[in-house]
Amino acid sequence: MTKDECKQVVTDIIADIAPDEDLTNLKPDVRLRDQLQLDSMDFLDIVMELRKRYGLEVPEADYLQLASLDSCAEYLTPKFNALPTKH
């Protein structure tokens, strides 16, 4: 998975948990919470969806790594690429 694909995964999850948010002009280098009306429960939903949909575990100590789309891609891309491929 590329970093751009990873950003799309996170954007798709945000679209599902916060359907009223306009995600068309998201800046990849700005904190998501500064651009969107996401509270801590929404953020937790993102982490839970990553686990449910993709089997990715994000320890609480690493939550700050998911602040922006760019940091999500930096943190999550190697994790996605380390997942066992499904046959």
Image: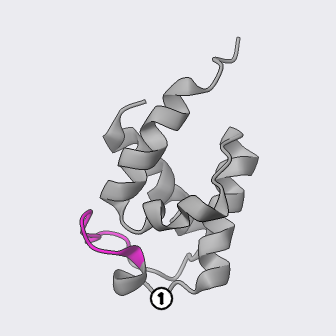
Task: Farthest residue to the right: give it.
Answer: 52
Q: Position of residue 78 (x, y in %)?
A: 45, 33
Residue 69 lies, in percent from the top left, at 36, 60
Q: Residue at x 63, y 17 (%)?
A: 85
Using the rendered image of the protein, determine whether residue 7 is visible from the camera's viewpoint.
Answer: no
Q: Which residues are magenta?
A: 23-32
- What is the crowding at mark 1: few (fewer than 14 residues within 10 Å), some, or many (at least 20)? few
Q: Residue 60, image x and y in percent?
A: 65, 64
Q: Secondary structure at mark 1?
A: loop
Q: Residue at x 48, y 44 (%)?
A: 76
Q: Position of residue 54 (x, y in %)?
A: 67, 40
* Pick the front one: 37 or 23: 37
> Which residue matches tag 1?
37
- Residue 63 falls left or right of residue 29: right
Hey, which quadrant is residue 44 in on the image?
Answer: bottom right
Q: Is residue 39 left or right of residue 70?
A: right
Which residue lies most toward the front here?
A: 61
- Above or below for 11 versus 17: above
Does residue 38 sit above or below 9 in this rendering? Answer: below
Q: Is residue 40 left or right of residue 73?
A: right
Based on the displayed image, in which of its 4 quarters is residue 82 positioned?
top right
Residue 28, magenta (yes or no): yes
